[in-house]
Image (spheres, rainbow, N blue to C red):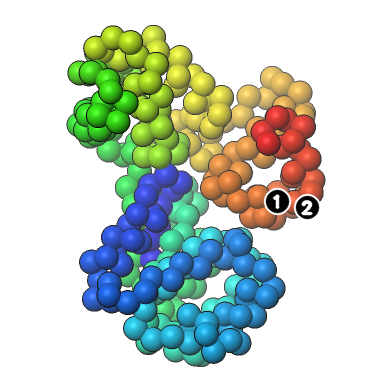
């Protein structure tokens, strides 16, 4: 069981475990539950060609939050009864929040299949590593983008280290790539860094608590509602079905809200 916030490279860890595992010469099958329709679920539990009927392979299951409680229980029961875990290696990736802890579905998977849990680190808990990470990534970007950037202005690096990075390493590498692309000197400027991080705040509503940060109530009800919608969408890694379920609205309603806000 690989647990972590958005942007903590859970997928990469799953691939690494597969590559270094004792079944690396056999197929890796990834099953994205968010993309499963009725026919897909039927195929998994009834078809002889289903990966669940195979042996000595690695099965990576993700986005198990996106299916209904009934579908989750049925899938869990079938996998257990069919002995899928006895014939194959199972990898699960699941979102994790330090605020909410391990969710009930994740606990069920861990208990049912006796999973070993791997918690992926957040960037905000490793801010001392940011200078070295930034230096390594800039070296890569220099080669890719034909740049000759040697570092940061001191205050620019300080801004990166004090930022909360709600989307963790994915957000960090994206921000660095944009900074490198706009920089026309040997050093990344503090002014460019501050400007870009302010834009990130607008996108991700970051705060000292990246999950349950305060909401500015000095706005219209519509603006506050959209703020909440975008936060939940971020926590659900962009999964609209899971977001709509948590908000107690239909996917159509969510789609209309995002469209009206210019987010689609």
The structure residue drawn at horizontal position 52% and vertical position 85%, both measured from the top left corner, is 49
Quick check: 78 above or below 181? below
Q: Is residue 44 visible?
A: yes
Looking at the picture, how far across and down is residue 25, in whole percent? 27, 75
Looking at the picture, how far across and down is residue 33, in whole percent? 57, 65
In the displayed structure, does residue 236 sit left or right of residue 240?
Answer: left
Quick check: 19 above or below 201? below
Circle 2 residues within 10 Å: few <14, some 14–19, many ≥20 = few
Q: Quadrant of residue 78?
A: bottom right
Q: Quadrant of residue 145?
A: top left
Q: State how far apart marks 1 and 2 are (Cα).
A: 6 Å
Looking at the picture, how far across and down is residue 72, in whole percent? 60, 73
Residue 83 disc label: none
Quick check: 84 above or below 101? below
Pointer 2 residue: 250
Given contact means CB atoms under 8 Å apart, are the residues at marks 1 and 2 in contact? Answer: yes
The structure residue drawn at horizontal position 74% and vertical position 43%, both measured from the top left corner, is 255
């Amino acid at each position: 069981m690989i647990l972590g916030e958005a942007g903590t490279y859970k997928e990469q860890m799953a691939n690494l475990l597969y590559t270094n595992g004792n079944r690396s010469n056999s197929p890796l099958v990834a099953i994205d539950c968010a993309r499963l329709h009725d026919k897909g679920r039927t195929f998994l539990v009834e078809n002889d060609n289903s990966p669940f009927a195979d042996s000595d392979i690695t099965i990576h299951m993700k986005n198990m939050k996106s299916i209904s409680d009934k579908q989750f229980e049925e899938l869990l029961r079938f996998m257990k009864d069919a002995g899928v875990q006895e014939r194959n290696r199972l990898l699960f990736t699941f979102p994790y929040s330090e605020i909410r802890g391990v969710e009930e579905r994740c606990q069920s998977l861990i208990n049912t299949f006796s999973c070993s849990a791997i918690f992926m680190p957040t960037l905000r808990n490793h801010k001392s590593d940011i200078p070295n990470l930034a230096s390594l990534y800039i070296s890569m970007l220099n080669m890719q983008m034909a740049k000759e950037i040697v570092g940061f202005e001191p205050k620019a690096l300080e801004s990166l280290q004090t930022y909360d990075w709600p989307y963790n390493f994915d957000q960090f590498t994206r921000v660095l790539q944009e900074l490198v692309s706009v920089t026309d000197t040997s050093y990344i400027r503090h002014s460019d860094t501050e400007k870009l991080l302010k834009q990130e705040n607008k996108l991700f509503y970051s705060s000292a608590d990246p999950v349950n940060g305060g909401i500015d109530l000095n706005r219209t009800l519509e603006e506050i509602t959209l703020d909440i919608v975008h936060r939940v969408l971020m926590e659900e890694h962009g999964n609209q079905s899971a977001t709509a379920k948590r908000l107690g609205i239909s996917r159509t309603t969510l789609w209309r809200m995002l469209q009206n806000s210019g987010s689609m």
